[in-house]
Image (spheres, rainbow, N blue to C red):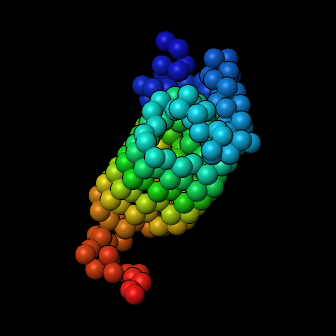
Amino acid sequence: MTEKEKAKLGYLYNANYDKDLCDERRNSYNICKKYNDLGFDEGKALLKNLFNKIGDNYFITPPLHVDYGYNISIGDNFYSNYNLIILDCNDVTIGNNVFIGPNCCIACAEHPLDYEMRNEGLEVAFPICIGNNVWIGANVTILAGVTIGDGAVIGAGSVVNKDIPSNVIAVGNPCKVLRKIEEKDKYKYPFYEE
């Protein structure tokens, strides 16, 4: 079984010294570098080749950094602000109408606590799923194996290490549900009226 196959199945695999995985990361780094240098308008076509899937009407503000790219599937109407990092050692699925603030990290990888195993280059990776209509605030980190439900809002600076249900506001480190999103939340900000 290849190291790539082990990663997909959630087994320990050698991410640091496997030639094929190192070459694939080098390739995605080069694509991201080109994208970041060109900017969104000129670099947009690169993302179609980098990701497994990307929907219609998206905007990813450079810089963007990913491990592989081919494990990432993104729905329609996606927006991310500056410095999105996706460590896609396993599947990362992002739904429709997702907004991500600046300096966010989505990390499928986990490393052994035992230093000898880490020094051998071993790690494990679990998929991450972000539902539809999710808003992720600035400086959020989403860790391996997490699912974020539809309509959830993740507060700035949160570290999401457990699943978050749909239609809630969740904040903190570790991230915890603060409350359900209610009808009154539509009126939090003033509307301009002529």
Q: Residue at x 46, y 37 (%)?
A: 54
Relative placement, left or right, of 158 versus 84 is left
Q: 28 or 54: nearer the eye?
A: 54
* Image coordinates for residue 46, horizontal then vertical, percent: 61, 33
Q: In the rendered view, would you say 156 is above or below 188?
A: above
Viewer-side residue, 135 vs 178:
135
Quarter of the image for residue 21 reads top right
Q: Residue furthest top?
A: 1
Vertical side of 1 occupied by 139: above or below: below
Residue 38 x, y percent position in the rendering: 71, 41
Picture quadrant where residue 104 is located: bottom right
The residue shown at (39%, 53%) is 97
Q: Position of residue 128 (x, y in %)?
A: 43, 42
Residue furthest to the right: 37
Give the x, y percent position of residue 75.
40, 42
| Direction from residue 178 to residue 62 in the image, left or right | right
Res 139 visible: yes
In what quadrant of the picture does the C terminus appear?
Answer: bottom left
Whether residue 64 appears in this view of the structure is no
